[in-house]
Amino acid sequence: MSERREAIVKAAFQVFSRYGLKRATMNDIAEEAGVTRQTLYNVFANKDELLRATIRLHADRSIAAIEARCAGLCDLGDKLDVVFDRLVVVPWVLVHATPHGDEILSGVRDVARQEVALADSRYAAMLETMLAPYAENLSTAGMTVSQLCDLTQRSWYGIRHKARDRDHLDTLLKSLKALVLNAARSC
């Protein structure tokens, strides 16, 4: 992504978070990015295209951060901590720090739902790669890597949306981590 495109996407995220998706205008985004409205339209045809790019940049950065932080880790628990931090804690904090951050992450528009689904499939593939070495143990426990991945991912989404406060979030993630580790390491 070019520097200009990335600066516009970052500005769009700020505007979407501040005003919500419905109220945010391309004029607001151009002003926040410090570009003319015409320049904005030269880079992004419409608000939906910009929303898609915003979600994709978030997913790209999340995956890159997880891969970088997990590169030197061997322990599954440590890797899960990294995944949960980046895909549950960071978005939870974001949603609670901005008036409309949840609109972006929850996919209230069709284009957002499509892009979030694409990101989810990328996250699932990454998690399946982490859990693949435990396939035999999981089979003994009566499940597949895909099943545990699906359960884990659906659980973290529920946790992210339903945690009452940060302590509750941390407690729920600790429990999810214990369940995943117990399933993966069972004999």
Image: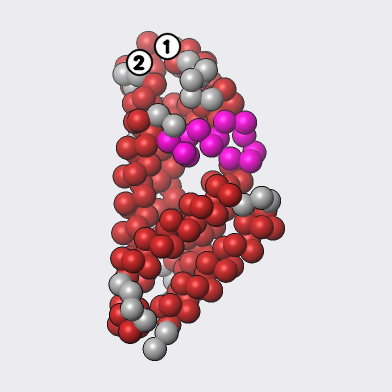
Name the residue tied to disc 1.
37
Is residue 106 part of the magenta span, yes or no? yes
177 up-or-down from 183: above or below:
above
Task: Report the amino acid beneath label 2.
Answer: Tyr
Q: Position of residue 131 (x, y in %)?
A: 36, 71
Q: Residue at x 42, y 84 (%)?
A: 186
* Point 40% across, 29% down: residue: 109
Residue 39 among magenta residues: no
Q: Position of residue 49 (x, y in %)?
A: 34, 26
Where disc 1 sits, the SS reads helix
Instruction: Give whichever of 81, 135 is nearer the camera.
Output: 135
Report x, y in % for residue 184.
Answer: 41, 78
Provide the secondary structure element on which disc 2 rests.
helix
What's the magenta bit mostly, secondary-structure-wise? Answer: helix
Magenta residues (range) = 95-107
Identify which residue is drawn at 48% across, 58% down. 155
Amino acid, disc 1: Arg
Location of the C terminus by quadrant is bottom left
Q: Residues within 10 Å of mark 1 (few under 14, many from 20)?
A: some
